[in-house]
Image (spheres, grey):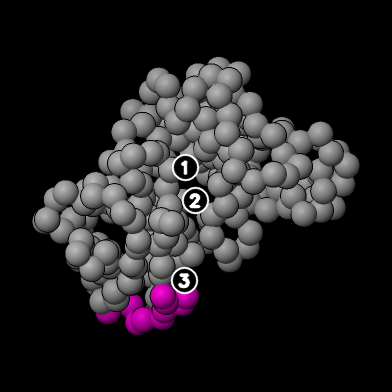
């Protein structure tokens, strides 16, 4: 079975700190695509960052970066200089190359404190 | 550019009434389309997906149905709503896999 595990149900950090959200996944496929989505209180689901499994270089989008360890099947998200607007649920997910369905984690609730 | 529209944003319906939620995509052709439901503070549950007009796959047996009458239109329906149908419904589309899904703004449904 293909699964995503987010082991941190909730995290809380001070504004301007750096925080890392963990994600591990399980798949027998060699090629797939990994994503982090953010869902703020408005509940709009927003793509934060994406990574192709065949690329070794870790993706970066402004203050957001990932640590992708393919052998360990790990895909953590680092948020630098955290801001109040980063408060949200964060979901890790992947799509195997063999189909088009996103496999989701249960989410991590991130709270940025002023 | 591609956009996805979902409406209504909020809906309060009595038990036993019908439901119709609509989702349309602009700026792309032959998208894969999805309906998700999310309970408060929980993850996403895939309800239906469609890879083409008239092609609907159901993931969870329930009181809901979906239709795709046009290439970029996806409709979620129910003939008689149950209290348990309350939740937050999200429509999404996907094209090439490496870009993931793009979501609509969601519909908050409360069945009373």
| B76 sits left or right of A53 in the view | right
Q: Quadrant of residue B91?
A: top right
Q: Which residue is mark 1?
A: B103
Q: In the picture shown, does residue A1 fall above or below B106?
A: below
| Badge 2: residue crowd in 10 Å (few <14, some 14–19, many ≥20) | some
Of A87 and B51, which appears nearest the observer?
Answer: B51
Q: In the picture shown, does residue B77 fall above or below A83?
A: above
| Image position, residue A69 (x, y; %) | 19, 65
Question: Can residue A91 be seen by looking at this rendering?
Answer: no
Q: Residue at x 25, y 76 (%)?
A: A18
Q: Quadrant of the N terminus of chain A?
A: bottom left
Q: Secondary structure at mark 1?
A: strand
- CA gap between label 1 and label 3 equals 19 Å
Q: Which residue is mark 2?
A: A44
- CA gap between label 3 and label 2 equals 15 Å
Query: Disc 1 sits on a residue from what chain?
Result: B
Q: Which residue is mark 3?
A: A109
């Amino acid at each position: 079975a293909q699964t995503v595990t987010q082991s941190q149900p909730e995290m809380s950090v001070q504004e301007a700190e750096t925080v890392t959200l963990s994600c591990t996944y399980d798949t027998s496929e060699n090629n797939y695509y990994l994503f982090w989505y953010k869902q703020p209180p408005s509940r709009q689901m927003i793509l934060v960052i994406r990574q192709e499994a065949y690329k070794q270089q870790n993706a970066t989008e402004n203050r957001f970066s990932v640590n992708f360890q393919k052998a360990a099947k790990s895909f953590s998200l680092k948020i630098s200089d955290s801001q109040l607007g980063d408060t949200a649920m964060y979901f890790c997910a992947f799509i195997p190359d063999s189909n088009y369905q996103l496999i989701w984690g249960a989410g991590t609730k991130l709270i940025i404190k002023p | 550019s591609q956009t996805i529209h979902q409406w209504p944003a909020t809906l309060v319906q009595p038990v036993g009434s019908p439901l119709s939620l609509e989702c349309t995509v602009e700026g792309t052709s032959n998208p894969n389309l999805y309906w998700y439901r999310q309970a408060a503070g929980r993850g996403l549950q895939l309800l239906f997906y469609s890879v083409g007009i008239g092609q609907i796959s159901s993931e969870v047996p329930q009181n809901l149905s979906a239709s795709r009458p046009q290439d970029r239109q996806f409709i979620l329906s129910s003939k008689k709503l149950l209290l348990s149908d309350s939740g937050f419904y999200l429509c999404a589309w996907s094209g090439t896999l490496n870009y993931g899904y793009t979501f609509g703004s969601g519909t908050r449904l409360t069945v009373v």
